[in-house]
Image (cartoon, helix red, strand yellow):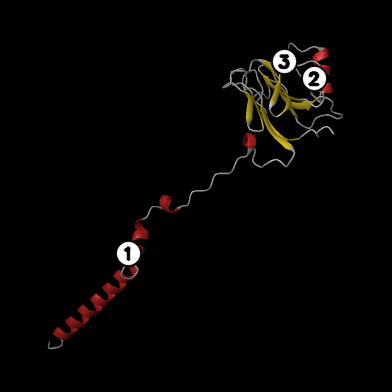
Amino acid sequence: MRLAGPLRIVALVITMAVTWIIVSILLGGLGFPRIQQLFTSQENSVTAEPRARKYKCGLPQPCPEEHLAFRVVSGAANVIGPKICLEDRMLMSSVKDNVGRGLNIALVNDVNDLLKFIRPLHEGTLVFVASYDDPATKMNEETRKLFSDLGSKNVKDLAFRDSWVFVGAKGVQNKSPFEQHVKNSKHTNKYEGWPEALEMEGCIPRRPAAS
């Protein structure tokens, strides 16, 4: 019976010591970092991922020196107009209100000199083409040959409501690597009556300066 008092004191001391140890662990010492971590939202602790850098005309990588950055987007069905961008200049778009159904053509002799429907084309003139709605109905054999001479390999097969984007040049010796074509087919069309829109981007070598 006489030991009951000392045992209660020992038990109380042990309880207080254990409680102090637990509190110290949770509080991270004398401060409150551990408690703050417990109540910190994970959303706040996650570092936001940096946005991918975009270059001229929205390209994911810069073009080499003496190359021109471009992006050509065909129209989507007969609703969304095409876009033609060169060296971060939007040459044609619905916002500029200079696009229409059929073939949208931008002729560029130099970065700062936009030519429009010049015949005959000057040697080295770049030709940017983006279809919208229907590019082929008003084409004749002479028109197809003109685009073929500019480097197109698909223009001969272009048909009603196909999607087509193309970049060629006056005086090219070979077929252009910058061309995409999707046939209008009810089995594969993305839209009712129209194939998917096409988007093409890249870097075009500058024409060497005349010596």
Q: Is residue 21 above or below residue 1?
A: above
Residue under numbered circle 2: 121
41 in relation to 83, above or below: below
Q: Is residue 163 visible?
A: no
Q: CA distance from mark 2 to mark 3?
A: 27 Å
What residue occupies the far right of the structure in this picture?
Answer: 173
Number of marks in picture? 3
46 or 128, nearer to the observer: 128
Measuring from the top left, give residue 74's x and y in whole percent: 66, 24
The residue tagged 1 is 32
Crowd tier of the residue under label 1, counting other residues whose Cα lies within 10 Å: few below 14, some 14–19, many 20 or above: few
- Residue type (three-letter) at the residue carrying disc 1: Phe
Q: Tell me what residue is drawn at x 80 percent, y 11 percent.
A: 140
Quarter holding the C terminus is top right
For marks 2 and 1, give the CA distance: 75 Å
Q: Amino acid at mark 2?
A: Leu
Query: Reading the chain from its start, which is encountered first: label 2 or label 3?
Result: 2
Instruction: Tell me the CA gap for discs 1 and 3.
Output: 71 Å
Asked whether, in this view, residue 26 is left or right of residue 193, the answer is: left
